[in-house]
Amino acid sequence: MKFILSTIVTAVAVWIATLLPFDLVVTGGEAEWWTRVLAFLAIGAVIVLLNMIVRPVISALALPITILTLGLFSLVISWFILWLTAWLSEQVDFLNLSIGGFWQTLLAALVIGIASAIMGALVGANRK
């Protein structure tokens, strides 16, 4: 249940980030409104899965750099998760997440993280 709730919260956060001028575009599912929702849910599920599997490994490996930069390197890790999501979405035919340059994607990852944290706290997705 927590995974589904986190996926929905992350999908809404990605949708919010696509509305802002960050060159973040989700393509796929343009036929009907519900297929568009499924496209955002698929992107959200990939981000949540990568945050559950890949982020702890990268965070552990990058701990000295994160300490040295007083935690700012975690933004680069968020950028990498978003970049990895875009790369994985290019491997399938029905879905694609296009990202812009480094700085635009870094700001988009920051917006997705903040929006996910706020909505997760409101909905209760972050509770253990």
Image: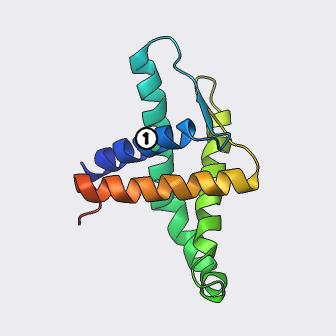
Q: Position of residue 66 (x, y in %)?
A: 61, 81
Seen from this angle, which residue lies furthest right? Answer: 101
3 lies above or below 67: above
Residue drawn 62% across and 30% down? 92
Seen from this angle, which residue lies furthest top? Answer: 31
Q: Position of residue 63 (x, y in %)?
A: 59, 83
Tell which of 22 and 126 is nearer to you: 22
Q: Quadrant of residue 35?
A: top left
Residue drawn 63% across and 78% down? 62
49 lies above or below 86: below
Quadrant in which the C terminus appears: bottom left
103 relative to 6 in the view: left or right? right
Callout 1 crowding tier (Cα within 10 Å): few <14, some 14–19, many ≥20: many
User: Mark 1 highlights which residue?
Assistant: 11
7 relative to 73 in the view: left or right? left
Residue drawn 67% across and 34% down? 90
- Report the amino acid beneath label 1: Ala
Tell which of 99 and 115 is nearer to you: 115
13 relative to 58 in the view: left or right? left
Q: Secondary structure at mark 1?
A: helix
Tell which of 58 and 110 is nearer to you: 110
Residue drawn 31% across and 55% down? 120
Q: Position of residue 45 (x, y in %)?
A: 44, 43
Q: Quadrant of residue 110?
A: bottom right
